[in-house]
Amino acid sequence: MVNPWITICVIAFGIVVAIVGVMAYLRMYKSSAWSASRPQVQDDAPAASDHSDDQMAAGTEFTDNEN
C-alpha cells in the first residue's frame, strides 16, 4: 500500500495540471474567438500617393513634355 501523503500529492498535482490546462485552453479559445469576431479590413487599392512614391523609388519622375 502507498503512503497517504504520496496519494495526496499525486491528486493535488493532477488538480493543478487540470486547472492550468483549462486556463490555457480558455485563453487560446478567447483569443481565437475574439479575432474571428473582428472584421478584417484589407486595402485592395493603394492610395494615389503610394504610386508616386513607387515611381520616385524606381527613378522615374513626372515630367511635362508638352513644350
Image (cartoon, rainbow, N blue to C red):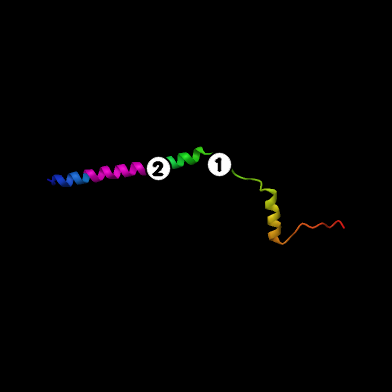
Residue type at mark 2: give it: Arg
Image quarter hosting the C terminus: bottom right
Mark 1 vs 2, N-terminal side: 2
Residues at discs 1 and 2 in contact (Cβ within 8 Å): no
Residue at left offset 68%, top offset 56%: 54
| Residue 27's disc number | 2
Please tell me whether mark 1 sits on a helix, a strand or a loop.
Answer: loop
Return the x and y of residue 8 as percentages of the image width and height.
18, 44
Residue type at mark 1: give it: Gln
Magenta run includes residue 64? no
Image-based side of 7 in relation to 20, left or right: left
Residue at left offset 72%, top offset 62%: 59
Return the x and y of residue 48 as percentages of the image width and height.
70, 49
Please tell me whether mark 2 sits on a helix, a strand or a loop.
Answer: helix
* Gap between marks 1 and 2 measured at Cα: 21 Å
| Residue 67's disc number | none
Image quarter hosting the N terminus: top left
Return the x and y of residue 24 as percentages of the image width and height.
37, 44
Q: Residue at label 1?
A: 40
Label tally: 2
Residue at left offset 71%, top offset 57%: 55
Q: Quadrant location of residue 41?
A: top right
Image-based side of 64 in relation to 7, left or right: right
Magenta run includes residue 16? yes
Return the x and y of residue 18 as percentages of the image width and height.
30, 42
**Which region is colored magenta?**
11-24
As drawn, the residue found furthest toward the top would be: 37
As drawn, the residue found furthest toward the bottom would be: 59
User: What type of secondary structure mainly makes up the magenta span?
Assistant: helix
Image-based side of 13 in relation to 3, left or right: right
Does residue 56 sit above or below 8 in this rendering?
Answer: below
As drawn, the residue found furthest toward the right would be: 67
